[in-house]
Image (cartoon, rainbow, N blue to C red):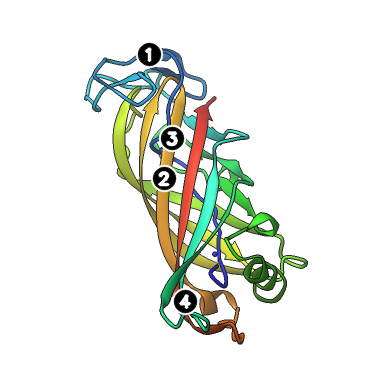
Amino acid sequence: MLRTLPLWICVLLAGILGGCSVAASPTVTGVGAGSKSGTTGGADSSGQILAPLEQGDRLLDAPGSGLRLTLLAEGNEARYRAQEVLARLRVPNEAVGRTKDVSGAITLDSTGTVIPGQSKITVDLRQLASDERLRDRFVRTDVLQTGRFPNAEFVAREIRGIPWPAPATGDFSFQLSGDLTVHGVTRSVTWNGSGRIGGGHMNATATTSVNITDFGMAIPRVVTVLSLEDAITLELDVRAVTG
């Protein structure tokens, strides 16, 4: 969401897990479930031991328990990457806008199925910033119209790739599908991500691509930009705790 405009959004995550550091002992608890210690293995940059996922190493051992992942107040970031050609350079350039104002949660039931009513990620588009103030102002006021549509929201509806019951520690990849709303328009998107779980935390990063025009926005036409591609990439880095 961009080089001359992000769509960002998004939002997502949700069962996400990224390559951030995790806290102390590799023990995670599920909603209404007890905790279980994970096995040991390789260590991340902080020295935290995180093992590859193993069949016998499960986060949830109580029948009927689910899992809720709540984003932390800090450590999250949403980005858009847009391909443009600036008039002053006349060569391809990648515009990157980002915001750390990302909040929300993802909830899975006892079968590992997403509960949409409890799984929403919100991104404050008013805080998007790139390396060009003029671009940022134009994107916020003329493209995203953040005065009317301040947030981008992603409601998760399906997650694939994560073993269930969820593991206590390890690295894995996933796909998170759902509805992304930007500029008052909702479209179905799928995020492709990877992450790490351990110490009661899940860190993840995910990406998806969307077209600016699919969300009711026109491709910006300004004298400083010769061209801007309709397709943009959205990225999301999140840090979540279980509870």
Q: Do the residues labelled 4 and 2 touch (CB within 8 Å)?
A: no
Which numbered disc, 1 or 4, marks the residue that appears first in the sequence? 1
Mark 1 vs mark 3, foreground winner is 3
> Circle 2 is placed at which residue position?
205
Q: For mark 4, give the secondary structure.
A: strand
Q: Distance between the residues labelled 4 and 3?
A: 31 Å
Q: For mark 3, give the secondary structure.
A: strand
Q: Are marks 1 and 3 in contact (CB under 8 Å)?
A: no
Q: For mark 1, give the secondary structure.
A: strand
- The spot of residue 174 in percent (x, y) is 33, 45
The kind of residue on which mark 2 rests is Thr
> Circle 4 is placed at which residue position?
84
Residue 182 in sight here:
yes
Q: In this view, does 228 lie above or below 150?
A: below
The kind of residue on which mark 4 rests is Glu
> Circle 3 is placed at which residue position?
203
Which numbered disc, 1 or 3, marks the residue that appears first in the sequence? 1
The answer to which quarter of the image holds residue 207 is bottom left
The answer to which quarter of the image holds residue 186 is bottom right
